[in-house]
Amino acid sequence: MSMNLITLQYMVASVCFIQALKGLSHPTSSRRGNLFGMAGMGLAIITTMMLVFQLSSEIASTGIGFVVVGLLIGGSIGTLMARRVEMTKMPELVAFMHSMIGLAAVFIAIAAVVEPQSLGIVAAMTDPIPAGNRLELFLGAAIGAITFSGSVIAFGKLSGKYRFRLFQGAPVAFRGQHLINLAIGLAILGLGLVYSLTGNVSAFAMLLVLAFVIGVLIIIPIGGADMPVVVSMLNSYSGWAAAGIGFSLNNSMLIIAGSLVGSSGAILSYIMCKAMNRSFINVILGGFGAEAGAAGPASAQQERNVKSGSADDAAFLLANADSVIIVPGYGLAVARAQHALMELAEKLSHAGVTVKFAIHPVAGRMPGHMNVLLAEAEVPYEQVFEMDDINAEFGQTDVVLVLGANDVVNPAAKTDPHSPIAGMPILDAYKARTVIVNKRSMASGYAGLDNELFYMDKTMMVFGDARKVIEDMVKAVE
């Protein structure tokens, strides 16, 4: 098998990855994007195995069995997890996948440092690893270690079921935290330079340990409100870790795929920060979560009065409206109410009501969470609108139905310059003629803030599990 053919196949796989990213940029083309991604990855795996046979038939004959077993085990576990995962657990699955990519980069880097000749970096065991390769191994291993430990913490925070304090959704801060992070970061850079210049294996081992530590420290001060940014940020890290290892192995496919993931994740992180009116540095330093936690006026929520109603009352308002905008939030995902919501939307549409869905960029616990949720319930794509496309319509809308959303519809972002979320773009639900909000209780959202929308005269609160409430609305509409 010629190297030209292998290069061509890698190029085709790279084009598939680019098409996958293009397809995943919009819900209507997301399925096609997934198919391109799977085809590209499948071709990349096959080509890599062909390359191994091409370079060393001896290594291929002795190691191919381990590769096949690894593929079978990994593929089986991945298939099982994908089939069993609930929509509410999807962010946790994504964090878990990021951690595995980071750990894989670390293991490959360790193997390259210990036995560079086995990976074709040097001709013989006694030959020193070139300085350029040592720099690449340092960067790939350090980023991979940060990705792994950071993703583990993100997994725990997203899960919300572990009592260990580091896994709690609230920010974890302590005195001198930023100075410690700075000192560890400088130590990692120093040790990385030492390894790159001298090849000292002890320096490499020490920087790995510190990288695992700082991965924990940069994620624990970030609160639940910023989890969408954390997920996209770790996605970017995993890509750069893979790219760094790709340079060390001289594998163009790994470099291209890692660069695509790294750059797209960085862009998405920027978009998420812009959607929250936060700087990326502030999110990394945990500033958003710390401010929000201090601002949450829990006592004020209990002292103020709200207007509440039943599911029948809400159904009456919806059925007699000409236009309805539905704002889904994470509470909808927790209740697994997307299919009941789709049934309600169909009932209203058949009754002559114009129904639209409004999606905020950071709704849910990862980017695109609400889009995926509605797609699972087969909500027509033409009824789903992003914030910038639908915000102008709220002022002419009869009824807005908010389901499990909180911070993304909080008017304080526009009306209170002292609010921690001041300036954050929101869905303008408060401009509608009537607002119906479904929540389990008056508890604050991830930002820990009271929501002025709940206390407006035009707002009716319907308390209860979203699925039960929506099912009761469906019956009432009938």
Image (cartoon, grey):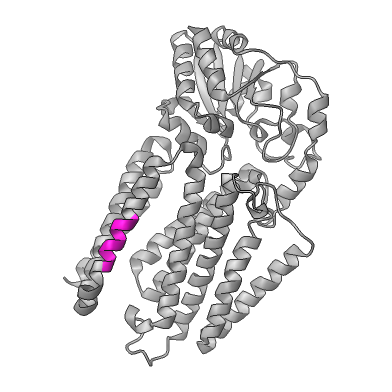
Looking at the picture, does residue 307 appear above or below residue 367? above
Looking at the picture, does residue 238 appear above or below residue 395? below
Of 90 and 422, the residue lying toward us: 90
**Which residue is at a point 42% across and 82% down the rendered structure image?**
114
How many callouts does the rendering have?
0
Q: Position of residue 163 (x, y in %)?
A: 64, 49
**Which residue is at a point 71% across and 27% down the rendered structure image?**
442
Of 447 and 276, the residue lying toward us: 447
Predominant secondary structure, magenta span: helix
Q: Position of residue 300 (x, y in %)?
A: 82, 30
Side (left or right) of 139 relative to 463:
left
* Residue 23 seen in the figure: no
Side (left or right) of 91 relative to 116:
right
Name, please, the residue furthest toward the front: 163
Position of the N terminus by quadrant: bottom left
Of 131 and 466, the residue lying toward us: 466
Is residue 71 highlighted in magenta?
Answer: yes
**Which residue is at a point 43% across and 43% down the rendered structure image?**
25
Of 274 and 284, the residue lying toward us: 284
* Residue 153 seen in the figure: yes
> Can you tell which quarter of the image residue 173 is in?
bottom right
Side (left or right) of 61 relative to 45:
left
Looking at the picture, does residue 237 appear above or below residue 81? below
Q: Position of residue 293 (x, y in %)?
A: 75, 44
> Can you tell which quarter of the image residue 325 is in?
top right
Q: Which residues are magenta?
A: 66-74
Is residue 395 highlighted in magenta?
Answer: no
Looking at the picture, does residue 147 appear above or below residue 26? below
Q: Position of residue 85 (x, y in %)?
A: 43, 41
